[in-house]
Every structure is written in structure tokens, then in C-alpha cells.
Amino acid sequence: MTERLFYTYIFVLTLYKPRSHKLDNLREFVAANNKDIYSVFPLNDKEELARFHFLNAAYVDARYKNKYTVDPEVLDKLIEQISQFQRGVLKESLQIIDNLIPGQNFSEDYKVPGELLDLQRLKSKKLPEAVMREQLEEIQLLEERMKAAQSEVEVERKEKERLLKKLRDAGIEP
């Protein structure tokens, strides 16, 4: 989402979409044009720098690392920053569009439909590892049921064979 917000702002400002996916490169591009939006992700101390680098690497790491973990405090702070960034990009983009179209006032007429970033919904989503764990448990349960069903079928087959053998031994052909 953060990458898309950078792209949106840069595109509205310059009609250009950078090829970079690195947030630090996109952040520097924005810095040349708007210090307010740029300042949403400050890099003044080790904690801020580490949090931004985490955000920059999170997309790839979360997708490709099996044991990917997220510190809830870092996540909460990032969500707060991204939400602030989203509001800033929306406000600035609408003002830029206002300047392009004389007589229009999109920035004042636009009403944000509630909170842009639904934090409660975002926090209530299950992490991929929890979803995978649930699916594995469900698969194991289904496998156990299937084995039990196969056992029942096998017991029924053996019982039928036993009864057929009894009938044959008694001289009765089925």
C-alpha cells in the first residue's frame, strides 16, 4: 500500500511512474517535491531507520521467508504512519488536481468515506501463518476421517468375504 501511495503522489505530481519498488528511492523522489509528505517517514534515529527498512523489506520477506515474524508494536507504529501518509497523499493530490483544473475545488468538495485505512479490520485479519496452521489442522482432520472411513470399508469387505466363505462352505452359491 505504501508503494502505491508513493506512486500515486509521484504520478499526480509529475505524470511519471518510477520503475523502482524500493520505498527509500520513492521517499527520496518525494522529498524533492514535498517535505510534509516526506516527513511522515522520518529517519532521525536508529528506531525510525530500522522501522522504515523493515517496511521496505517486508513485502519480499513476508512472501518468501518461511519464519517471518512481525513485532506488533512496530506494526502499530507503521500502520499509524501509513494512515497519516495516506491522508497526506490524498490531500496533496487533490490540491494538485485543483491547480490543474481552473474553477474546480476537488480538495474541499471531496468527503473521505470514513477512515481511509480501517485499522480494526486490518488488525483482525489473521496472519498467513495462522491461516496455514488452520488449513493444515483441517487437512489432518480430513485425513483422519478418510482413514477411519477406509477402515470401515475394509471391515465391511472382510465381513462380506467371511459370510461368502460361510455360504460356500455350507454349499450355497450366492
Image (cartoon, rainbow, N blue to C red):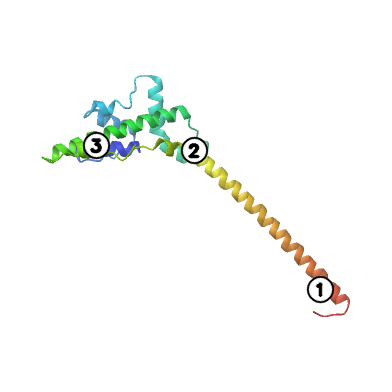
- Give the percent coordinates (x, y) of residue 99: 14, 37
- At mark 1, the secondary structure is helix
What residue is rendered at 38% in x and 38% in y?
118
The outermost residue toward the left is: 102
What residue is rendered at 18% in x and 36% in y?
96
Query: Which residue is tagged 2?
Result: 65
Say what amino acid the circle numbered 3 marks: Ile
Quarter of the image holding residue 173?
Answer: bottom right
Q: Earlier in the sequence, mark 1 or mark 3?
A: 3
Q: Is residue 37 left or right of residue 140?
A: left
Q: Earlier in the sequence, mark 2 or mark 3?
A: 3
> How far apart, in angstroms, are the residues tagged by discs 1 and 2?
58 Å
Q: Is residue 149 left or right of residue 19?
A: right
Quarter of the image holding residue 78?
Answer: top left
- Give the percent coordinates (x, y) of residue 128: 50, 41
| Closer-to-camera residue (24/41) | 41
Say what amino acid the circle numbered 2 marks: Lys
Mark 2 vs mark 3, foreground winner is 3
Image position of 28 with respect to 165: above or below: above
- Give the percent coordinates (x, y) of residue 45: 37, 19
Q: Earlier in the sequence, mark 1 or mark 2?
A: 2
- Give the percent coordinates (x, y) of residue 152: 73, 61
Image position of 97 with respect to 172: above or below: above
Q: Which mark is residue 164?
A: 1
Query: Which residue is tagged 3?
Result: 10
Q: Is residue 80 left or right of residue 38?
A: right
> How far apart, in angstroms, are the residues tagged by discs 2 and 3?
30 Å
Q: Are marks 1 and 2 in contact (CB under 8 Å)?
A: no
Mark 1 vs mark 2, foreground winner is 1
> How far apart, in angstroms, are the residues tagged by discs 1 and 3?
81 Å
